[in-house]
């Protein structure tokens, strides 16, 4: 029996011990400081690539509390440890010496004058908050010991520095350094570090705005102790003691406010490290602010710019809107990421796409004559026509009509897909909604996206392909990209300087754009190292008569380029990236059978798909070159002539006096295959709506014809009805009824030409 009782007692003892150990483990686990500051709300902080502050937004609880720092400035760490916890690097979370000293001081004073808390214990208190009771104190001590078992002293210092109160709504050393001293914590002087070290000790009673003498006394006593312990020399000590205390809290930097707002939306409560170069950012802001002040006198209120480093593909300067703090309507709109009408800024992408497709060559002649495509009647900016113009010149001069012809050939849906894959995020509608106006500003684009595409083209050409920027990048032919940049380098500069003649003037491939109604002015330029995009206009959408890309955004663009290090020009394409072929000097097409003047050019890989020259023809002339004759005529001889279609020729001759038109056919030779006239409007098979006048009347539509012999008489017929004749200027106003019709013209030599069309019921 005795033995059984002993065994039962032993079992109960073991169970009790196990229960005690389990309870202790549970309490230990319960009291371990898990997830410190997990519910803390932080400010949104944005810094440049070197960690310099660009701007910040206050936390949701109204505190300037920067996200936790991982490092603590040496001067502040030394001052903090000396003031708060001298044995910090030696104790295990609780300092027995400090506790005994605090108890002695409290007993002598009859009240609590010292708590004896270590920095680690204060971290526990800052994390949990709540009442400062004896139980809470014991809990903090236990948690501090446990916390120090798994964390370094530097980590603990960083947690304290990030969450200590510094008066008012300022929390943490980083926010305090900026709010009180206007610079980062890393740049704190000894006097500043000591001030911030003593401030959290009693932030409510010792405040920058009150009790300043008491605060200075505390600071100076701390500085003296640091000096006595050889933490600083005598000169530093004297200078630190002479430093005045800061006055009112300072505003935080606003060096990229629109970018900071964007980060606030996407990375709220975090520190975002951008690729912005602070030095460049400040200078670009100064340029835009200066230009904005000037442009506002002309009714252009807003100005934005972005600069990309070609080699990284990152934005290194970002000004969403100039003078954004002046309170004007629209100043807070981030234009860099706002969809705006593109004007002509997309034309280089279309030119490059057709080059790499082999549909055109760099100098292929394109038609530049009046056109009306189912009611869409684009005009060039100067409202003139060149008849025929080389593709590269059409791009450099930003001619609208050749661009419309190119887009029609390439296809609107295909071009939309190309732009989206290149990086345009604003093309959200169906391609049919944009139509051919897409190339003239019928779509919206973002300055950020478009400038980035130019930067990608530059990087792709130079084989800077070490990242994901080029996945599915549509401009795959480097020689096409090279010719595109070559054409853009010929765009007339706003300063009227010719980089060909002045070696100090840098060569830039650049393009401007002006939207319909003079609402948006663009200028985007690229070199082997940088891409710069500028937008000018009114964020609220109103137009301004002087708002033209070349005159407003262009000068700003070159001012920004002048800030950047000079770049060498793009090297010519390397073997393997091009083919060589002979190209007609006059037409820009591949050499044809009758082309006698040619250049050998490095061309895109698909260039051989391009059409051979259609304009050089063999013609038999009379002995005096005055007539086209049959080859059997005595004295006749064959010559090669450069002959454009009549509609192109009509306008081309006004600008090219050297152009020799085809001589008339001699009466004795009947007819030949050459057709001397061509309809300018309408296009064969088109559907036409007849517009109503302001008074509601319908006056018909004007049919337009070009004839290679201007003074010839042309006779017009609508279906089977004679309508009249024209000479010199071949235009005829007709009023067809609803349905299908045919207009036939016959010239005095008996040549005839017909065009069929349909009149829409909506116009009648």
Image (cartoon, grey):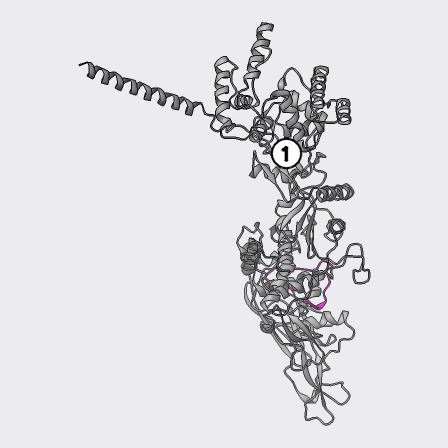
Q: Quadrant of the N terminus?
A: top left
Provide residue 669's location: percent of width, then percent of height. Answer: 68, 89
User: Which of the 4 quarters of the picture holds residue 302?
Assistant: top right
Q: Residue furthest front?
A: 3
For label 1, the SS is strand
Instruction: Please tell me which residue lies in front, 636 or 270.
Output: 270
Mark 1, Cα crowd under 10 Å, few <14 / some 14-19 / many 20+, is many
Q: Is residue 233 above or below residue 470?
A: above
Reply yes or no: does residue 524 show up in magenta. no
Give percent across and percent down for residue 622.
74, 89
Q: Nearer the viewer, residue 493 or 693?
A: 493
Q: Is residue 646 above or below residue 618?
A: above
User: Residue 324, percent across and down?
Assistant: 70, 37
As drawn, is 14 to the left or to the right of 65? left
Q: Nearer the viewer, residue 501 or 120?
A: 120
Quarter of the image for the C terminus: give it.
Answer: bottom right
Tell me what residue is drawn at x 62 percent, y 24 percent.
Answer: 81
Residue 387 colored magenta? Answer: yes
Count of numbered badges drawn on the protein: 1
Image-quadrant location for residue 65: top right
Residue 376: image quadrant is bottom right
Q: Residue furthest bottom?
A: 634
645 over 406 or under it: above or below:
below
Looking at this view, name the residue that lies furthest to the right: 502
Q: Position of residue 662 (x, y in %)?
A: 72, 80
Q: Main secondary structure of the magenta part?
A: loop
Using the image as rendered, state which of residue 90 and residue 390 is in the foreground. 90
Residue 179 in view = yes
**Looking at the image, can residue 726 be seen?**
no
Residue at label 1? 56
Q: Which residues, given as a range, are shown in magenta?
A: 370-390
């Amino acid at each position: 029996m005795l033995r059984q009782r002993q065994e039962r007692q032993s079992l109960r003892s073991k169970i009790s011990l196990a229960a005690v150990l389990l309870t202790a483990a549970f309490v230990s686990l319960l009291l371990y400081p898990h997830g410190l500051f997990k519910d803390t709300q932080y400010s949104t902080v944005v810094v440049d690539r070197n960690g310099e502050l660009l701007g910040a937004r206050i936390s949701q609880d109204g505190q300037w509390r920067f996200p936790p720092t991982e490092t603590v400035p040496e001067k502040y760490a030394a001052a903090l440890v000396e003031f708060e916890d001298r044995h910090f690097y030696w104790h295990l979370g609780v300092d027995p010496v400090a506790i005994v000293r605090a108890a002695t001081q409290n007993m002598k004073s009859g009240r609590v004058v010292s708590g004896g808390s270590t920095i680690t214990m204060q971290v526990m208190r800052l994390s949990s908050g709540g009442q400062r009771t004896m139980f809470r104190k014991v809990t903090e001590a236990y948690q501090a010991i446990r916390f120090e078992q798994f964390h370094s002293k530097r980590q603990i210092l960083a947690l304290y520095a990030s969450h200590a109160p510094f008066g008012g709504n300022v929390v943490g050393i980083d926010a305090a350094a900026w709010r009180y001293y206007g610079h980062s914590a890393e740049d704190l002087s000894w006097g500043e570090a000591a001030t911030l070290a003593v401030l959290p000790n009693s932030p409510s009673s010792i405040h920058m705005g009150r009790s300043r003498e008491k605060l200075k006394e505390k600071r100076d006593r701390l500085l003296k102790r640091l000096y006595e312990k050889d933490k600083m020399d005598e000169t530093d000590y004297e200078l630190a003691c002479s430093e005045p205390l800061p006055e009112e809290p300072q505003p935080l930097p606003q060096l990229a406010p629109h970018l900071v707002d964007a980060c606030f939306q996407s990375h709220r409560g975090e520190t975002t490290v951008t690729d912005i170069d602070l030095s460049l950012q400040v200078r670009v802001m100064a340029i835009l602010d200066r230009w904005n002040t000037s442009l506002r006198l002309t009714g252009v209120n807003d100005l934005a710019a972005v600069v990309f480093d070609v080699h990284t593909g990152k934005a290194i300067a970002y000004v969403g809107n100039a003078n954004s703090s002046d309170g004007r309507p629209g100043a807070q709109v981030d234009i860099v990421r706002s969809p705006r009408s593109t004007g002509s800024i997309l034309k280089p992408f279309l030119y490059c796409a057709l080059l790499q497709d082999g549909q055109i060559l760099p100098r292929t002649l394109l038609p530049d004559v009046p056109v009306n495509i189912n009611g869409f009647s684009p005009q060039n900016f100067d409202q003139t026509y060149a008849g025929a113009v080389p593709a590269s010149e059409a791009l450099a001069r930003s001619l609208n009509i050749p661009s419309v012809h190119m887009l029609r050939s390439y296809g609107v849906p295909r071009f939309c897909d190309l732009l989206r894959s290149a990086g345009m995020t604003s093309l959200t509608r169906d391609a049919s909604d944009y139509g051919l106006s897409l190339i003239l500003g019928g779509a919206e684009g973002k300055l950020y996206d478009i400038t980035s595409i130019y930067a990608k083209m530059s990087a792709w050409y130079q084989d800077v392909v070490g990242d994901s920027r080029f996945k599915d990048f549509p401009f795959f032919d480097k020689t096409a990209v090279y010719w595109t940049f070559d054409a853009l380098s010929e765009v007339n500069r706003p300063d009227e300087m010719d980089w060909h003649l002045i070696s100090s003037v840098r060569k830039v491939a650049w393009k401007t754009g002006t939207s319909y109604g003079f609402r948006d002015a663009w200028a985007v330029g690229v070199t082997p190292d940088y891409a710069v995009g500028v937008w000018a206009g009114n964020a609220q959408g109103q137009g301004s008569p002087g708002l033209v890309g070349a005159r407003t955004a262009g000068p700003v663009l070159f001012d920004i380029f002048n800030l950047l290090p000079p770049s060498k020009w793009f090297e010519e394409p390397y073997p393997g990236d091009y083919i060589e072929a002979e190209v007609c000097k006059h037409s820009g097409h591949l050499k044809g059978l009758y082309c006698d003047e040619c250049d050998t050019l490095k061309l895109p890989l698909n260039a051989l798909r391009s059409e051979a020259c259609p304009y050089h023809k063999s013609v038999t002339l009379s002995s005096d070159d005055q007539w086209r004759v049959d080859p059997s005529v005595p004295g006749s001889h064959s010559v090669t002539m450069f002959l454009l279609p009549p509609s192109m020729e009509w306008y081309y001759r006004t600008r090219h006096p050297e152009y020799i038109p085809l001589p008339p056919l001699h009466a004795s030779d009947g007819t030949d295959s050459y057709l001397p006239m061509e309809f300018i409007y309408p296009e064969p098979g088109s559907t036409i709506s007849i517009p109503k006048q302001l008074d509601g009347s319908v006056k018909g539509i004007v049919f337009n014809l070009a004839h290679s012999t201007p003074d010839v008489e042309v006779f017009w017929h609508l279906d089977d009805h004679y309508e009249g004749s024209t000479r010199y200027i071949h235009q005829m106003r007709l009023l067809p009824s609803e349905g299908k019709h045919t207009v036939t013209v016959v010239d005095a030599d008996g040549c005839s030409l017909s065009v069929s069309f349909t009149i829409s019921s909506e116009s009648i």
